[in-house]
Amino acid sequence: MGEKCLSSGPVMLYLHADVSFVVHIHERKKALNDDYIQFEATSNAFEHEESSYLVKEDRDHLFLRCEVSQHLWAMIIRRLGYRTLPFHSWDVFSDWLGSKDSICPTTLRRLVAQAGIYSLWHERNNRLHNNISSSSEVIFKLLDRRIRDAILARRNRKKFKNLLAKWLTFA
């Protein structure tokens, strides 16, 4: 049996280059680690025949380790120009967001991270509350649109001038 991707609690999203959303999630570590949710799942939503699960949710699993998030991050990382996934835990993910490298601008990494986390949270809510699931490819297509829209809305700002070209370089 594979692990299921779920979490609970209110989350706010800011699709701009600061890390307020990521910090908000980071501060919820203890609460997310202690959360348990019993839910009804259809075989369509989670590709299992069992009808109910007791799932221990944590931030690392929901955003980095479940099957959907791993596949989504793999697509994101390739689009950013990296060869391998540079993070495996939330702490390494946070360090990656703050680091500087020659492959991808920090602003783009942070924007993509926020959009990725938002997309995974949105998918989690659709599966949990609406029994609607989407493939990683569909989630990535929506994420790509969010990122393009966010960059285009800020295209006149200095840090956003060349981000769209960089985002599309490895498309």
Image (cartoon, rainbow, N blue to C red):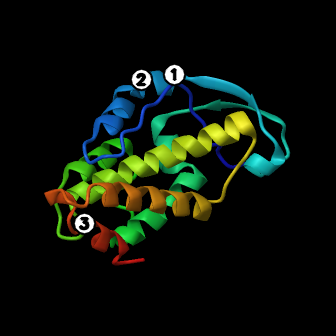
| Residue 84 is at least partly visible in this image | no
The residue type indicated by label 1 comes to: Asp
Q: Which residue is mark 1?
A: 34
Q: Which mark is residue 30?
A: 2
Q: How many marks?
A: 3
> Quarter holding the C terminus?
bottom left
Q: Position of residue 133 (x, y in %)?
A: 70, 50
What residue is drawn where x is 32% and y is 55%?
Answer: 153
Q: Which mark is residue 104?
A: 3
| Residue 13 is at least partly visible in this image | yes
Give the mark toward the camera: 3 or 2.
Answer: 3
Q: Position of residue 89 (x, y in %)?
A: 39, 46
Mark 3–mark 1 distance (CA, rounded to whole Å)? 35 Å
Q: Is residue 79 above or below residue 16?
A: below
Do residues under tags 2 and 1 come within 8 Å of each other at their CB atoms?
yes
In the picture, measured across the screen, residue 15 lies left or right of residue 36, that is left
Mark 1, residues whose alpha carbon is within 10 Å: few (<14), some, or many (≥20)? few
What residue is drawn where x is 67% and y is 55%?
Answer: 134
Q: Secondary structure at mark 2?
A: helix
